[in-house]
Amino acid sequence: MDLEAVRTFVAVAEAGRFQTAAADLSVTQQAVSKRIAALERTLGVRLFTRAPRGAELTIDGRAFLPHARELLRVAERASASVRPGHRPLRVDVIASRSAQSNLMRGFHRAHPEVDLDVLMLVDIESAVAALRSGAIDATFRAVAAPGRPLGEDIASVRVLDEPLQLLTGPAHALADARSVPLARLTGHRIWMPGIAPGTEWGAYYDDLVAEFGLTIESTGPNFGSDALLDTIADTPALATFMGAHSRLIWPEGHDLRRIPVTGPTPVYPHSLLWHRDNPHPALAALRAHLAATTAGHDAAGTWRPDWVMPR
Amino acid sequence: MDLEAVRTFVAVAEAGRFQTAAADLSVTQQAVSKRIAALERTLGVRLFTRAPRGAELTIDGRAFLPHARELLRVAERASASVRPGHRPLRVDVIASRSAQSNLMRGFHRAHPEVDLDVLMLVDIESAVAALRSGAIDATFRAVAAPGRPLGEDIASVRVLDEPLQLLTGPAHALADARSVPLARLTGHRIWMPGIAPGTEWGAYYDDLVAEFGLTIESTGPNFGSDALLDTIADTPALATFMGAHSRLIWPEGHDLRRIPVTGPTPVYPHSLLWHRDNPHPALAALRAHLAATTAGHDAAGTWRPDWVMPR
DNA sequence: TGTGCACCACAACTGTTGGTTGTTCACTAA
DNA sequence: TTAGTGAACAACCAACAGTTGTGGTGCACA
């Protein structure tokens, strides 16, 4: 199926005549006739009844028309997504199904008029480089990881402190606890595959281990959250940490338990970073939205690494 | 933008290499290279960084990828919408924003897995012909208009009795009435542009006029509901009827009034028609849904034409 | 009942393009 | 260095989309 043919189809449907559609598209009537004929051939149905008064949509044509319009809309959005200059606001999040994605969904609900692209880069270095180059407009990160100053040109603000919860299978020793103090986790094996040293998550868990003497294993390949949940569900000796706001795909029949951690509650600090000179108009709206909807930083009884930037 | 190029882009993004993508698409590596180069030229950005290990998405490429996937999905749905054999369920409604469209929205919410196309045909004759030819699977109509038997092959069931309300501007004599008896409308001018004689609506209002002595004018061209509402809002001597379930676009600052009609309440009878031999699997689901969610036919204190089919 | 008119399809031609094969270039690993 | 991998470039060819020119069909109107 050819997009140019689809565009021609919509033009003919709106004009009701091949001739005027041809004029609208600045081609000859014969070209329009050929395009429609080709589209009808690929679809295998007749889209117009040709009358001496013009062309009228068949029932198949009527059914096809809204899909054709939608196709052109999506194509326009696709090409706009990389249009230099007026492209959609581009925001980098650390993972789909994370608290950050939830924040972006909330922003989209509050501002449906803002064109938005959410993507996932790898590490904070490439994200900050992308901010500097203008390839992205904002990124959610935990700043600043120790020993890595951001630079004067990068602005940031803390937007959310997300409590961590313990995730266990039904046979785990702590499975039936209503909540568990952080100190009680000493000696339990906590498995966090995919947490690489040098990343923000790595620095975070390094500090958690150093301060509370936990046993966190980040060994082994990361086969994705499905495999992680499968393993946690079946292994009595393993648990894992999970953001309280993450919307994971709950596997059927696995009876996993989310257990709040207390005394203190470790919270993961999400910040928004952007370039001070970024002129994107929607960036201000995003910052205002996040400032208005997120709160509760530094609550009593919570823990975060000491390198977390002050508010 | 060429859909084949977009498909190639997605294949390369998934494979990570031009060569394997070429194999997947059964073309040569050179053809893939050309397609990507052409796509990058039309978009004006680089989509891949070519490394000796393969091709990796640029940030622009990452932003473009979900749009490209969506584009292919929409294209597939578009061509499926006219695929003979397994096409979506095709249902004809009398107008968008009508009670019938609301019913179809409810069905779609209840059965999001059912592919659905909603369209609007002109009159009941063409709709029934389309049912017979298999071009559509169901139609919402008011059956049977007087003197027009449907035939043994067309089945129908009443699905909704929709009360009519009076719509007036703020200066109308009845504007502040909480409700108005049908008999009180004698002498008031009621304007229903676009109601053609011979159609179901025409027959309905003919009967209403004959029984209650109303003054209904269907003269004048129908410039659409916007123009109708504008006129009603500004003209003290005019009112119109409107289905209680219709979701019209309420104009800003017009202060229109919807006034229930009583003693009796005229109700418009919506029925679903389909061909007895139609094998579409989703048709049964639609009938079951409508049977389960609609009720309240023939309530006391309501009026409908006597040609309305019994339940 | 012709005749003109409006409209679309068909035919022939042509420039562009998308595909192929053959080859070169860049980089990595041994 | 050399072999190997992966993508781009060059040349060629077939197919196609566009053009001009022409034909056919149904309606309006004399």
Image (cartoon, coloured by chain):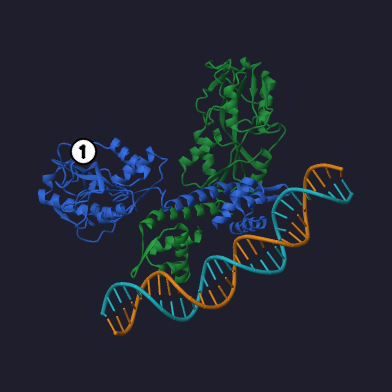
Chain colours: A blue, B green, C cyan, D orange
The one of B275 and B30 positioned closer to us in this rendering = B30
Drawn side of residue A111 relative to residue B254, left or right: left
Q: x%, y% of residue C20?
A: 51, 74
The one of B67 and D19 positioned closer to us in this rendering = D19
Residue occupying image coordinates x 37% and y 42%: A282
Look at the image and tell me whether residue A23 can be seen. yes
The one of B67 and B209 positioned closer to us in this rendering = B67
Q: x%, y% of residue A278?
A: 33, 47
Residue occupying image coordinates x 50% and y 38%: B105
Q: How many marks?
A: 1
Q: x%, y% of residue B80?
A: 54, 53
The one of B277 and A226 positioned closer to us in this rendering = A226
Drawn side of residue C2 relative to residue A21, left or right: right
Please identify the quarter of the rendering in which residue A216 is found. Answer: bottom left
Residue occupying image coordinates x 29% and y 35%: A292
Q: x%, y% of residue A180?
A: 15, 42
Mark 1 crowdedness (10 Å alpha carbons): few <14, some 14-19, many ≥20? some
What type is the residue that disc 1 sits on?
Answer: His
Residue under pointer 1: A297
Mark 1 — on which chain does it sit?
A
Look at the image and tell me whether residue A237 can be seen. no
Q: SS class of the residue under badge 1?
A: loop
Drawn side of residue B262 relative to residue B17, left or right: right
Q: Quadrant of the C terminus of chain B?
A: top right
Please identify the quarter of the rendering in which residue A33 is found. Answer: bottom right
